[in-house]
Image: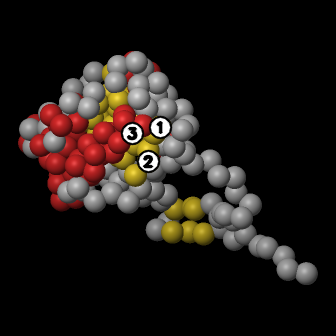
Amino acid sequence: MFQLFLVPLFVLGSYVAPTNSAMAADTSLKSGAKAPEFTLPDQDGKAFNLTDRKGKGWTVLYFYPKADTPGCTKQACAFRDSIKSIQAKNAEIFGISVDSQADQKKFHTKHKINFTLLCDDKAEVAEKFGVKMPVIGIAKRWTFVIDPELNIRNIEKDVDPAMDAKKTAKLLEELQAKSK
């Protein structure tokens, strides 16, 4: 008889819990699910609570690994440059990474970002949204489109940093046309 043995793994000196995907429950968020509630400070230290967005239009939450790195800068600047087309679709953009408030503020200022960056320095929100990378604890590059009732309408897991803003604007248009 075949017997399954789970052996702890040690990677870079850190314990990684073994998993058996056939036995593990699928807890990842899916399109149609209610977005997890959270409150995070923005780049200026002001609290942002997702529930405050209810009924105020669409919300784009994009998670990125590290402020002021090449891909993350390209993505943030693309959203910055596309903000008018996204706002014209009754949506607001919020970038989230596990960077500190000071790092987010510096990134925001340096690249003249014209939307809110949120500081998830304990990676708790990244964990809630299923984007926290094991071991290194940074966020995966995923984009969530959330409707005015705070339901997740789309999760983009294969994100091209340079094209995410344009793709998101087009997606917002398609989703809004379906909901009319």
Residue 80 spot, x, y in % from top left: 15, 41
Name the N-terminal-most of marks 3 and 1: 1
Q: What distance separates the C-alpha of mark 3 from that of mark 1?
A: 11 Å
Residue 170 spot, x, y in % from top left: 28, 46
* Image point (35%, 42%), residue name: 174
* Image point (28%, 59%), residue name: 160
Badge 1 marks a residue whose secondary structure is: strand
Can residue 55 be seen by looking at this rendering? Answer: yes
Quadrant in the picture for the N terminus: bottom right
Q: Amino acid at mark 2?
A: Ile
Tell us which disc is closer to us: 3 or 1.
Answer: 3
Tag 2 and tag 3, C-beta contact below 8 Å: no
**Residue holding disc 3:** 175
**Residue holding disc 2:** 155
Colouring? secondary structure
Along the viewing direction, whichever of 177 and 98 lies nearer the viewer: 177
Looking at the image, residue 140 sits to the left or right of residue 33; the answer is left
The dot on residue 152 is 1
Can residue 76 be seen by looking at this rendering? Answer: no
Q: Is residue 72 above or below residue 129?
A: below
Q: Is residue 55 above or below residue 18?
A: above
* Image point (74%, 61%), residue name: 23
Looking at the image, residue 27 sits to the left or right of residue 100; the answer is right
